[in-house]
Amino acid sequence: MTASFQRARRPEQVEARRAAILATAREMLAERGVAEISLRELADRVGLAKSNVLRYFDSREAIFLEVLDQEWIAWLDAVEVAFAEVPPDDAEAVARQLADTLDGRDLLCELIAAMSGVLERNITIDFARVFKRRASANHDRLAALVLDRMPALDPASAAFFGGAVFVIIAGLWPYSRPTEVVTTVAAELGAPPDWADFRAHLAEGLANQLVGQVTRSNPPRPPRAS
C-alpha cells in the first residue's frame, strides 16, 4: 500500500482500506485454514502494522466474521434462485438444493465450522452486537425461503430448521476434510471414507431434519371416539 493510502482518513478511503483487508483475508483463506492465519501475517500481507489493522477491525476473528457475513449473503442469493425450481412441500428437493448451492463454497463452510467455537470467542461486545444482528437477519431470510417452499411447516419449525442447517454444516465439514494422518489410519483399519462426499451427506442430513420438522409441525390427530 502507498503512504498516501495509509494516511487516508476520508470515509471512502477508510472503506477502501477495510475492503483491502477483507480481500487479503480471503486470499489467505484460500491457501490455508482459519486456525493457521495469524493477525500479524495478515497485516504483513496487507502492508500495514498489526495495530493499524486493529483500527478497522476489532480482532483477527472479526475480520473473518465479516467475510462470513459476505459469503452468507451471497449463498442466500443463490438459494433464492435455486428454490424457484423446487415444488411445494418437497423436503428432499429443498435439502438437495441447499446442499447443491453449497457445492464449491468451501470458504463459507470453513467459516461456518469455525464460527461458534473459534471466531465468536475473541470479539468485542460492540462488534458482537453488529454481527449477531446481521446473522439474525440472514437466519430469518433462510427460514423465510424454506417456509415459502415448505408451507406444511409452521414458522417456528422453519426457524429451527434454519439454525439446524448451520449446525449440520459445522459438524459435517471437518469430517469431510480429514488430515492425512487420519485418512491413513482409517484406511489401515479398513474404514471407508464415509464422510468424504460432503454434499451427499449434507443433503441426507438436511432431508431427515426437514422431514422431522414437518412431522412435528403436523402431529397426527387422535382418532375420534365412536
Image (spheres, rainbow, N blue to C red):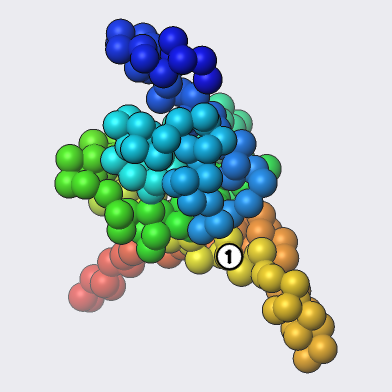
Residue 49: percent from left, percent from top: 42, 35
Decide if residue 190 is in sight here. Answer: no
User: In front here: 4 or 28?
Assistant: 4
Question: Relative to 161, does residue 84 appear above or below in the rendering?
Answer: above
Provide the residue designation for mark 1.
174
Residue 48: percent from left, percent from top: 45, 31
Q: Amino acid at mark 1?
A: Pro
Residue at 27% across, 49% down: 123
User: In front here: 208 or 36?
Assistant: 36
Decide if residue 112 is in sight here. Answer: yes
Residue at 30% across, 8% down: 10
Question: Relative to 140, does residue 37 appear above or below in the rendering?
Answer: below
Residue at 56% across, 35% down: 45
Q: Is residue 105 left or right of residue 167?
A: right
User: In front here: 12 or 190?
Assistant: 12
Placement of the C terminus among the 4 image quadrants: bottom left
Q: Is residue 69 left or right of residue 31?
A: left
Residue at 66% across, 64% down: 177
Question: Relative to 207, does residue 223 appear above or below in the rendering?
Answer: below
Question: Relative to 53, does residue 95 appear above or below in the rendering?
Answer: below
Q: 10 Å neighbourhood of mark 1: few (<14), some, or many (≥20)?
A: some
Which SS class for mark 1?
Answer: helix
Residue 191: percent from left, percent from top: 76, 84
Residue 98: percent from left, percent from top: 56, 45
